[in-house]
Amino acid sequence: MKIKQINIKIREFDSEAELSAEERKLLNEAVGAIDSSYAPYSEFHVGTAVLLENGGVVTAGNQENAAYPSGLCAERVALFYAQSKYPDIAIKTIALTAATEQFDICTPLAPCGACRQVIAEAENRQQLPIIILMRGNTGPIYKVTGIESLLPFAFFEKKLRKYPNH
Ligand code: THU
């Protein structure tokens, strides 16, 4: 038996002032996108902003539904929109945050498992890592470069076929 350990790198920033101007702006667009959240059931309002390689930005909020599983996270709303509208433009960064009237979110909001899988697919499609910026309402900001840090052992297209050593 062997133990295999995975090492992930997370950059932690104490405040937005430590970020680049581009990252700060994107996070603020994610904060603004909280207003586009439709979350009457959870009252957990998520905002996300996706920065494209050409400088374009796509923002989205989570969209809930009375039939609960029919709703969609903010990240997937934004990523699917970006990929539908700009299929040939790579995604550089995705920033996310959330707000609720119930409490202060004092740790960085991390994407759910399904959204991580969708980010993995986008990376695989464009063959470029995506930067993920995460913040709450207070507390630190986390940055990772590449979904592997949040989703080791992601399921990729290669697994659907018989490749040697897969
Ligand atoms: N949600 C997101 O939009 N993104 C996340 O990363 C976590 C969860 C949404 C789904 C649902 O509308 C609400 O937050 C509570 O789970």
Image: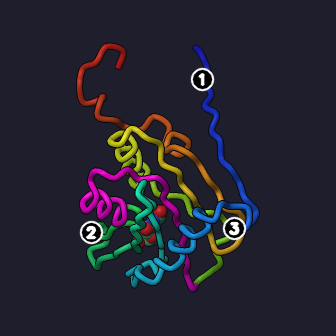
Q: Of the numbered discs in the image, which one, if any, rests on residue 4?
A: 1
Residue type (three-letter) at the residue carrying disc 1: Lys
Residue identified by numbered label 2? 70
Among the two numbered marks 3 and 1 on one chain, the one whose residue lies closer to the N terminus: 1
The verdict on residue 98 being magenta is: yes
Left or right of 147 in this view: 136: right
Residue 59: x percent and y percent?
41, 71
On-image quarter of the C terminus = top left
Query: Residue 156 versus residue 81: which sits nearer the camera?
Result: 81
Residue type (three-letter) at the residue carrying disc 3: Glu
Inter-mark Cα distance, 3 to 2: 34 Å
Residue 107 drawn above or below residue 121: below
Residue identified by numbered label 3? 16
Q: Residue at coordinates 41% horizontally, 79% vertically from top-left?
A: 37
On-image quarter of the N terminus = top right
Inter-mark Cα distance, 2 to 1: 38 Å
User: SS class of the residue under badge 3?
Assistant: helix
Q: Are marks 2 and 1 in contact (CB under 8 Å)?
A: no
Residue 104: x percent and y percent?
65, 78
The extreme front residue here reads 54
Residue segment shown in magenta: 76-101
The verdict on residue 85 being magenta is: yes
